[in-house]
Image (cartoon, rainbow, N blue to C red):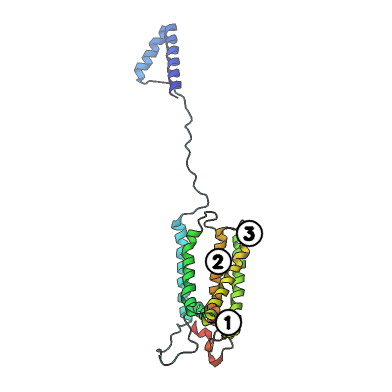
């Protein structure tokens, strides 16, 4: 651009010299105009500015504030509205002062611990109350470290295949684990193998192994049907879905289908006038 401006200035000077040499009268007029106006003139060229490369921001993002904050506020208000409305309809199941000499039948834990209490009916307390919950917590803590892929971040179930995997895994868990609870209730290993195997095998090894096998069956199926394309995230989704659906199923069984003696009954056919709905 500088070279072009120099060329134009040189051309202007040459043309001016020729103009002055040809017509002296015009020279006087030109000097008079220049002296009266007090302005100077130059020839320049408009050059298009160069383009600056910049990183492009993602198109599928939103602002966390206020868009996300508004949705979180709506969810919070909706939850509070539901809890307040439910408390107006149903009183808290508070009973009289506990009598240490009398144990209620059934003595049920709060609903958020009901799944663990249901597990106590099928295995040793150490595995039901310590080992399995500890494994679940460790698994949840390890998920961000096991799945480092950025593909599908922020998208429910990552892909259509992930959505199908989650759906069928949930159906599997909601069918298989209640079936296991029912079968184990009528044919408990601790009674079937009481005279054959030691207590640690019938109350710990066998039920724990059964739960591990039931959990790994959908994992193996997804891995085998993936034709070598199964991702770590899909395996983690299977495990997570199995654990959550199994906990939900065991909670429902323990809360609604366990009656006096912690035996299985239909919710509407409980003996001794007991109703599981009174604990809501």
Q: Who comes first in sequence, dot 3 or dot 2?
A: 3
Say whether residue 32 is left or right of residue 153: left
Nearer-the-camera pick, 155 or 61: 155
Q: Which label sits on residue 39?
A: none
Whole-percent x and y of residue 3?
A: 44, 21
Q: Residues within 10 Å of mark 2 (few under 14, many from 20)?
A: some
Q: Are the residues flagged by discs 3 and 1 in contact, CB closer than 8 Å? A: no
According to the picture, the residue beneath numbered tag 3 turns out to be: 226
Looking at the rendering, in which quadrant would you find the N terminus?
Answer: top left
Callout in the foreground (3, 1) = 1
Nearer-the-camera pick, 60 or 233: 233
According to the picture, the residue beneath numbered tag 1 turns out to be: 189
Visible residue check, residue 111 = no
In the rendered view, would you say 81 is above or below 194?
above
- Total residue callouts: 3
Secondary structure under badge 3? loop
Secondary structure under badge 2? helix
Secondary structure under badge 1? helix
In the rendered view, would you say 10 is above or below 139?
above
Whole-percent x and y of residue 232?
A: 55, 59
How many angstroms separate mark 3 from mark 1 (CA)? Answer: 35 Å
Visible residue check, residue 217 = yes
Q: Who comes first in sequence, dot 2 or dot 1?
A: 1
Callout in the foreground (2, 1) = 1
How many angstroms separate mark 3 from mark 2 (CA)? Answer: 16 Å
According to the picture, the residue beneath numbered tag 2 turns out to be: 239
């Amino acid at each position: 651009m500088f070279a072009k401006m120099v060329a134009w200035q040189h051309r202007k000077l040459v043309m001016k010299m020729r103009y002055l040499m040809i017509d002296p009268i015009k020279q006087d007029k030109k000097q008079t105009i220049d002296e009266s106006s007090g302005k100077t003139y130059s020839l320049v060229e408009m050059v298009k500015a160069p383009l600056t490369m910049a990183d492009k921001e993602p198109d599928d993002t939103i602002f966390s504030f206020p868009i996300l904050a508004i949705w979180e506020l709506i969810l919070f208000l909706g939850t509070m509205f539901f809890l307040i409305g439910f408390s107006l309809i149903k009183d808290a199941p508070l009973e009289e002062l506990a009598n240490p000499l009398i144990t209620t039948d059934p003595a049920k834990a709060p609903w958020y611990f009901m799944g663990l209490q249901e597990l106590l009916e099928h295995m040793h307390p150490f595995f039901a109350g310590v080992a399995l919950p500890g494994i679940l917590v460790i698994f949840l803590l390890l998920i961000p470290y096991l799945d480092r892929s950025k593909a599908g971040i922020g998208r429910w179930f990552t892909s259509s295949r992930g959505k199908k995997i989650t759906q069928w895994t949930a159906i599997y868990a909601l069918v298989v684990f209640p079936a296991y609870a029912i079968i184990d209730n009528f044919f408990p290993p601790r009674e079937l193998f009481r005279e054959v195997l030691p207590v640690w095998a019938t109350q710990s090894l066998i039920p724990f192994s059964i739960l591990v096998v039931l959990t790994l069956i959908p994992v193996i199926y997804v891995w085998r049907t993936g034709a070598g394309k199964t991702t770590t995230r899909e395996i983690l989704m299977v495990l997570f879905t199995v654990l959550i659906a199994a906990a939900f199923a065991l909670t429902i069984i323990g809360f609604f289908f366990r009656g006096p003696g912690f035996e299985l009954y239909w919710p509407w056919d409980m003996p001794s006038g007991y109703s599981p709905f009174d604990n809501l």
